[in-house]
Structure formats: structure tokens, C-alpha cells
Image: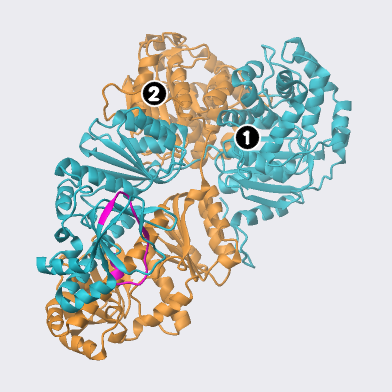
Chain colours: A orange, B cyan
Amino acid sequence: MSILPPSPTPSLETPLLRFLKETHARFGPLDEGEVASYIPELGKADPDHFGIAVATTDGHVYETGDTGVPFTIQSISKAIVYALALDTLGAEHVEATIGVEPSGEAFNSIRLRADNKPFNAMVNAGAIACCGLISEATGEAAFEMIRAALGAFAGRTLDVDDAVFQSERATGDRNRAIAYLLRTYGGVRGDVDLILDTYFRQCSILVTARDLAVMGATFANHGVNPVTGQVVASNYAVARTLAVMSSSGMYDFAGEWIYRVGLPAKSGVGGGIVAALPSQLGLGIFSPRLDAHGNSVRGIRTCAAMSESFDLHMLSRRGDVRTAVVADYDFRTVPPRPGRQTKAQEILAARSGAIRVLELSGQLSFATMDYVTRRLTDPAGVPEFLILNLHRVSTITDAGLSLFIGLIRNQLPAGTTAVIAGVEGSSPVAPQLKALRDQGVRVRIFPTYDAAVEWAEDQIVYRHGGFSQVGVEADLAGQSLLAGLSLQEISDLSRLGTRVTFDQGARIISASEPPAKVFFLLRGMVSARAANDVRLATLIPGMAFGELALIEEARAADVFAETEVVCLELGVEAFRTFEEANTRAASRIIRNLAVLLAARIRMATARIEMLTG
Amino acid sequence: MSILPPSPTPSLETPLLRFLKETHARFGPLDEGEVASYIPELGKADPDHFGIAVATTDGHVYETGDTGVPFTIQSISKAIVYALALDTLGAEHVEATIGVEPSGEAFNSIRLRADNKPFNAMVNAGAIACCGLISEATGEAAFEMIRAALGAFAGRTLDVDDAVFQSERATGDRNRAIAYLLRTYGGVRGDVDLILDTYFRQCSILVTARDLAVMGATFANHGVNPVTGQVVASNYAVARTLAVMSSSGMYDFAGEWIYRVGLPAKSGVGGGIVAALPSQLGLGIFSPRLDAHGNSVRGIRTCAAMSESFDLHMLSRRGDVRTAVVADYDFRTVPPRPGRQTKAQEILAARSGAIRVLELSGQLSFATMDYVTRRLTDPAGVPEFLILNLHRVSTITDAGLSLFIGLIRNQLPAGTTAVIAGVEGSSPVAPQLKALRDQGVRVRIFPTYDAAVEWAEDQIVYRHGGFSQVGVEADLAGQSLLAGLSLQEISDLSRLGTRVTFDQGARIISASEPPAKVFFLLRGMVSARAANDVRLATLIPGMAFGELALIEEARAADVFAETEVVCLELGVEAFRTFEEANTRAASRIIRNLAVLLAARIRMATARIEMLTG
């Protein structure tokens, strides 16, 4: 690892851009190697051109040097056309025709395997066979299909250098020999000239170093072009193409390459190299001077410097599966949610271990999700309600989802209900989770953490209290905000208020209006929602809302009736009137409010400590 | 990907254990292949033995079947001995003697490369050369060194099967031929018989499938044995050994293996296979029936089933660099921290953009850290104080650290101070960050987020207010808790209190004592700390602490004097006395307390929303 030297003039250039510029300056003077000349048109390339581009999996492209200069893609096309064949013709068909073993020979070798198949799709024989398979399946449309696939990987429409194409065709006898040899054994079927025309045209497609970087990033991003967002190849085709690139992408330099540089890569005699590090980045380099293996000299040096400086070897990976679980707690250690009726609070306090929450984060992959499942193998630790909060989960791989579903379906005991929080309807996992529920698996899905916890708490209160709080009219004396007041004081207060009813869905409080009223919820359920319609909290009878009106001058949230709702509504002015006659009681209310707020702070602090601990 | 069928009897078995048991049951009946017999002792193995073990990078080991049955490690030792040689003899020396290209031939081939070097360390020629290098360097200690290395990878002391050793030695003529051929070209120096004795003994070391899984997990865990925690190989040696395993570990089946299964692996004729997926898991399988390539038949099938069912191909990786940044905000969008003196609050409110916070999470790798740096390329978005909260960062790779240091050192403009939060003294990055500071780079390091924000705020107040709040005695009238009281009321209250002084370091409040006093901080600085000594908040003059004593009966935290401190101390009883005479003022204080608590809730809620949003 290199630590970069200090800059004399600090700038906002990122360290990576700085590194790329320094690398460009460092290898720019290298004039080893020769421009390819066996195809006469290629000999016309400017040997001094040198461009380096890096595309990230979130779609940013770094560029330095001649990254906009077009050149012909040549053998780099083989990788993308192989992926195209795997996806469009079926992997079995392609794998039956073309091998996946390194050949140990030069790219233009005519030697086939003992069973007369091409060694792999990265040498000319395999690439011609691959082109033949596409031609056989699509006829005259083959070339346009190939051009479209390369364009989809690059994220733009690509042109052909007709002069190079004509030159390749005029001097392509070795490839003709390979194609005819393949046809002897059925490795190519149909008109050899037509197939070779498609192949020569494919090699003559014009790209830039920037295009190669985006192509690499598309491979690195499991087949999704990170600039356009388009899905251009399947995960299967991407992984298998990268495997063949790893073992055979750099011709007879492949073993050294995978050992020293450790990045799946493909080079072309036009001077390009594309490299891809899965889930990290794509690298595109253009520099036409080639070494004896046919690889770009400055390209090889740049890849090696990148890999060495930043430890990018594909087999050098670190990770800690434990970071998938941000927090794991039940309500024995977290203060109770304030504001419920006393009876409900007692029920919940007596069953504080009945809900367990796992807050998950990052990527749920095979290894991280396996770790999550291992936290739930002790029967004593598996509660009535297991809340899995996925709100902070960025991605779930197929394997992660398989283990997740296995957990819910097979691992949890029959008495446990899985409660999945943080899954919006638009989430990619929502359909699978809903399908599980339709199959009778005990799983509930909520968009927010708060809604999940409150639903689970309501269930516990209902199961163990024998009643649902929502449907029963609460006694005003049970309101937490009025604790310690005499019945006379409560009666006096209630006479100053108005009993009001709201239909389901009605907006009871608007955050944009001045706070003029406090509401004591007597029957039904309300929800407080933020401006973006995110549900902040759900309240049930015995709880007050809008209570900050007693001390503040702005509303924090909208409040909606989730069911038909009955409230005692008390104007702030009425409270002031009450205060004049009942100073002690009014002080007590404010004090109760402070106590409730202190409890909410403890809860919020505990949650922050768990999220950041 | 397979979704597992529902279980008739749900249990707490994790989905992966279930899968391993099912796989064991599925391939158990397979009786293809033959036990190796070219070494007579090996022919005595029970062909029906079949064990599968998976070790995770957090040190859990799953086992099913005959995972405790010992068998000889044979060629699997080659991988670990190669890593040992790279680490102890120097990579250059080893790489000059042994190649890294696939041979395309059987493991016991005598053919060398054109330059008379062994193709790679996974075939017998390369392994014997490797054993020779260790013998040359360490003499008679060679075998014990090898045995210790294998034991360190397995996490226990390993024995030798003397009968197999004698049998190998008695029938080892092909290996003798290879060794003598190597000596012809200097690939082996010294006494061939001694070297081969070490080599045969190395192959006769006894392991179990469980041992192989732990060895694999040690490779997967960048050379740290996840069960023992011991560092047993360098990251360099691990990545390079895995590279050679990828291209040559499964003999002449390597290309197919990397294409189809995609896990670096090594097999032995004893019936073992070890496989490693970096950062995910190690796999160990024992089943002695071998196919024509010399690989365990059920072992190959098990690896393939694992890879296919869970998409474990090493080049099939997903990730989203953006998840590294959990939250990115300044104090324009977050409510101000309550409790400061009015003047300081005004200064901070006018400069709410002067502090920007990036809360980072998970692994800071090359790609994720590059993403972080790209959020800071717009000069307009880079503030006076950039707080980077690392509290939730699980690991920083070397490359991630290099970019992190590059960001602080070269990317940020001269007017910006980097404030690193969440770095304890014991953190592995603390020394590098402190070294930066010693080099004059503007960076400050704090163990907690709160300490970092408060320090930055103090700096802003000091820079723009021209005074430090800490050293100046605050006027009691400026206390937020006393807002709205008349000077007479404040004077009455202060007469009921006592002016007290504390030395630096004194404990002013103990969480374990009943709350009997509230303190108004007049001069100096105090910190509130949780039971585990984590600093919760820092308070400066103008703020009160212990104020919940006015409404509650338990303390939440210890409070310590960070400097010499002057307070007005007010007993709860004295407050009750004040209340009797000054009902309105006392109510106002409780109301002020509620207002401060409401502000703290808003701040906490905003922080939770950012952490979970």
C-alpha cells in the first residue's frame, strides 16, 4: 500500500483521481513495445496515446489522458460476445461448443483441444466459434446484435472503423484457416466468409478508454451498466465470463496475471485493456504499444500499479459478517414506550422479553445472513415476536434471501411470529415475503420500525390482557398526562374541552397550522406522520397528542385518524383558563409532560446507542 | 438458487445447517470412484466415510457426517506450505524457483516448464521444490515448522500417520525421480532423501474435515484463523496462494472448476477437499472415493452444490458502495443542540453550515472510501469542520485507509479541519491518524460523536464570538432553565442554592445516588458519562445538569468535572421551598425543562431518522 505524498497545492481532487494522474505521468514516458502491425491499418495508431479511465459501480467515471480517443476494440470484444452468447443461446449450448480451459498458447494459435473444441472463448478459435454460434442463431442480424451488446456495455452507440475492417478482412488468412479447421469438426457451421465478416467487423468496433472502463464496471456491477442503469447481462454470464477472463484473458500471460495483478481482464491488439473487480470498479486503458504477448505495455503497468497500490487482488478480500447486525435487543434492556394506558404498560412490562429486535444493515449476503440465522439458534432466545428491521439493508443477494426465507419458514418455532420492518411495497423482497404469508407462514410486514413494534405490542396486550385497547373507550383518568390530578380537577378540565369524533383517514392536526389544541385520545387509533408521509408513531387510547402545544409554538407532524376516533379536544386558551383556577393541577400536567418527554428521550437515546454502538 | 422446501418439524437449525445435512443425505449414497491405492496404506480407508464442515469467518463451524474422522492431508498441504514459504522465505525467492502457471497435466507429472522450473506449487514437482526451499533455509527444523504451520491453520496440534508415511516413502519412486530432475536444474538443492522425508511426512499429517474447514476459513479470513484469532499468514501470501489454487488447485480439472464452481480449492488423494471463499467461508470435505483426476467424487459434488445453491462463485459479487455513508448532513437541517447560552446559540445558528457530518458505516474499502471522497469534491460543500464519524465502521482496509489519509491530507482545502469521531485509542487506525496530526495536518480525533460536535461548536463560538464560553463565568440569568424568570425570582432562587467549586476530575453526580440536587454550571466544563465510561455529552456554562431531579427519581448518568468547575447547586428540597413561595416561577422552570427536553427529542429523532433513513 502506498500512502500518497502531500500535495503542495491542496485541492478537492479525490485521492483516486490524484493517483490516476500520477500514474499517467509516471508511465507516460515509457516507450517500450510496438504498435501492432500485422493488420496494416492498426500500424497507423499514434503510439504515444495513453488514456486511463476508472468507472465505479455507482456510475462515476474518472478519466485522465487520452480517454476520448477512439480505437478498435479487437479481442476485448470476445469477452462481451461470449457473455452475449451465454445469455441468448443458452449456457449449455455454448459450453458444449467452446471449452473453458487455458490454452497455454498465443491468442492466434490454431491448436484445438484433444476433442477438437477451442480451448476457450478468449482465443481466436473460441471467439470465432462463438461468433459462429450467434450467426447460426440469428443469421444476418448477428453483427447488429453484437454491436448492440457492446454498446449496451459501453452505454452508448458504437461505430465501426471501416478501414480497419477492410484491412482485417484483407489480411485475415490465419483466422480463415482457424474457421475452416473448426468447420471440419462442426465447431463452426454455415458460411465461413459471412461468419468471419461478422467477426472482423466485431473486432473493428470503435471504443475509447472511457468506454472500456464502463464496460468493466458493467461486469463489476453484476451485469447492470452503472451509468445507464440498464441490465445488459445475467449474473451467470458475468461470473462465467470473468472466470474465463481470469484464466485466459491475458493470453499466455494469464497465470502470472492472476497471480500478480489478480483482476479479471481482457486485452486487445488495438492497445486496449479492460479489467473488472466485482462489486468495486471497472478499469479501461488505452495505449497502443504492445509487448511480446500482445498486451499493452503501459496498460499492464497501470493495472499492476492499481492492484498493488490499493490491494485490489480479487482474492484479497476482507469483511466482517457481524456488521450485518447493528443491534439485537429486547425490551428488557430498552425503556418502555411511554404513553400507553397503565394496564397495557403493566402487561408489556411483565412480558418485556416477548419481542426481540434485530436491526440489520448493509448487504445480506450468504455469509452475513448465515450469521443472522446463527443468532437465533437458542430456543430460549427466540421470542413470541421476532422483529427483523431491514430498513438499513442495502441489498439482499439471492443466497441471502434464500437463507432469510429458510429462517422464517423452517428455523423459527411455531409460536414465533416473524415481523419484518422497513419493507416498503416497492422493495424487491416484498413480493417474496408476501408470497410466504400467503402460504400460511407466520410473517407480518411493515414499512416502518415503529409500526412493527407497535403492532407487536398491541398483539401482546391483546393476547395477555384479553382486550384490544383500540376499541374500548379509555377513561380520562387513565391518561398519562393527567396522572396525579384529582377526579374534580379532571372533571373541571374535561368541561373546558369538547368531545370530538373523526372519521377514519381524517387529518386531525396539520403541521402547518399553529398549535392551538391538545387532544386526549379516548377511542380508536391515530398516527403521527412526517412531511414525507412516513409514519412516526401510532397512538392508542390513553395517550395524548398535540401535547407540545402546551409549551411550544410549532407543530412537529401531521396527525391522522387511522380508525374512527373519539377525542377530548382542549384548546390552549382553555388550558390557560384552567391554569388560572387550578395552578397546581396545571403545573402537574406540565410536569407530567416533562416526565413523558424524559422517557421518550431515554428511549431515543437507547435507540441511538444501539444504532451507533 | 434453491429455496428450501418447508420443514415438517420446524426447528432452530439454521438454513445452512439444514442444507448441509440435506446435501450429506443426498450425496451419501453416491458410490462412484475408487479409494486411492497407489500408496498401499491409503487403500485401507473406509470408502463410505463422508463428512462436510463449513467454518465461517466469525469462527463458527458447522459439521455434518464424519467430520471428526482423521485422514492424511496429502496434497492439500501444498497450499499451506506454499503460503508458509512465501511468508518466511520471501516471495521473490519462492517465485524465482516455482512458477505460477497451470500445467495442464496430472498432479504427479514429471514435466517441467521450458525454463526447467516447476509449473506451480500445487503439482508434486512444485511442492517438492517448495519443501526443498524450506529445508534449505531451516535444515532439520523444516518438518516441525511445516507441522506447526498446518496446525496454526487448523487451530490445533496435528499428528502424523506413521504407517502412511512409511508407505509413501516405500513407494515414492516417482517423487524421487521428480526431486532428482529438479536437482539437475537447481530447483532442489541438498539431500534429496531428507527433503523427500520431510515431504512424505508433510503429506502424512492427519486432519479432519473440520480441520480443513477451519484451514479454508483462515484463507477466507485473510490469514487470521477465525477460531483461534491467531494471524497465521500474510494477506499477500493468502491472496497469491488462493490465486494458484484457483488456476491449478484441482489438477487438470482447474479450468472447469473455476468456471463452474468458482471457489479456490485444493484436493488431496486422502479424500479431502478444502475450499475458501474470501471474506465468506471455508469448506472442508472428506470422502475417500476419487475420480479419474484424483479429486473426491462426493467432495466435488458437494462444492458444486454449495456454489450453485448459494451463488458462491468468487466472481459473482454484489455490493453497493453508497451504503458506506449512512448520513451526510450539516446543522441547517438538524435542530440545534439545546442548552447553550443565547449568545453562543446565535453564533451557531448563523453558521449552521460550518459543520458537516458524514456518518460512515461498514467496511471502508477501496471502493467505498473512494465513494466517500467523491461526496467532497464540490468546494461549496466543504465546510470549516468536516466531522467523519467512524463509530460504526467495522474495518478499514489498507487501500481504504490510504484514500482516507489522502482525503484529509490532500483533498480538503486549507481552511477545513477534519474531525474524526468514533476512534478510541485502541482503534487500529488511531496511530496513523495521530501521526498525521503530528505532521501538522489539521485533524482532530475524538472517541465519541458528541465530543466531536461539541468541540467543533466550541471552536466556532470561539472563532466568531471572540470568547471561549468555558473560561468566563456565566450569568445565572442566561441559564436556559431560568428563561422568563424575573431578576428578583432568580435572586430568590440563587439565595436558596450554594456556590460550589469542583476540582478537575471530580465526580459531581453519581448515577447510583438518588437525585437530590440540580446544578447550574457557571464556569468550566463538565461531562456526563454512561456506566461504561462512554461520554454522553459535554456541558459548558449556561447549561444545567442533574435537572431531571426536579421531576424524576433516578439519575441517568455520572457527571464529572472536565476542568475546574463552578456551579450553583440547588437541592430539590430547596426548589420545593422556592416553589411554595414562587409558584409561577417554579412552574416556569418545569415548563422550561419540558421545552429543553422537547428540543432534545427533536435532535434525537432527527439523528435516528438520519441513522435509519
Residue A421 location, quadrant: bottom left
Dot 2: element? loop
Q: Where is residue B542 in the image (x, y as percent from the top left)?
A: 20, 56
Q: Residue A55: x, y in percent?
A: 37, 32
Q: Mark 1 lies on which chain?
A: B
Residue wearing tag 2: A205
Q: Nearer the viewer, residue A511 or B395?
A: B395
Q: Is residue B558 magenta?
A: yes
Quadrant of the snapshot with the C terminus of chain B: bottom left
Query: Which residue position holds label 1?
Result: B232
Q: In the rendering, at what x and y percent does residue A446 appear? A: 39, 65
Q: Which amino acid does label 2 sit on?
A: Ile
The CA distance from mark 2 to mark 1 is 49 Å
Q: Is residue A151 something that shows in the picture?
A: no
Quarter of the image where one finds residue A100: top right
- Magenta part of the protein: which range? B547-566
Q: Are the residues under marks 2 and 1 on the same chain?
A: no
Q: What residue type is labelled 1?
A: Val
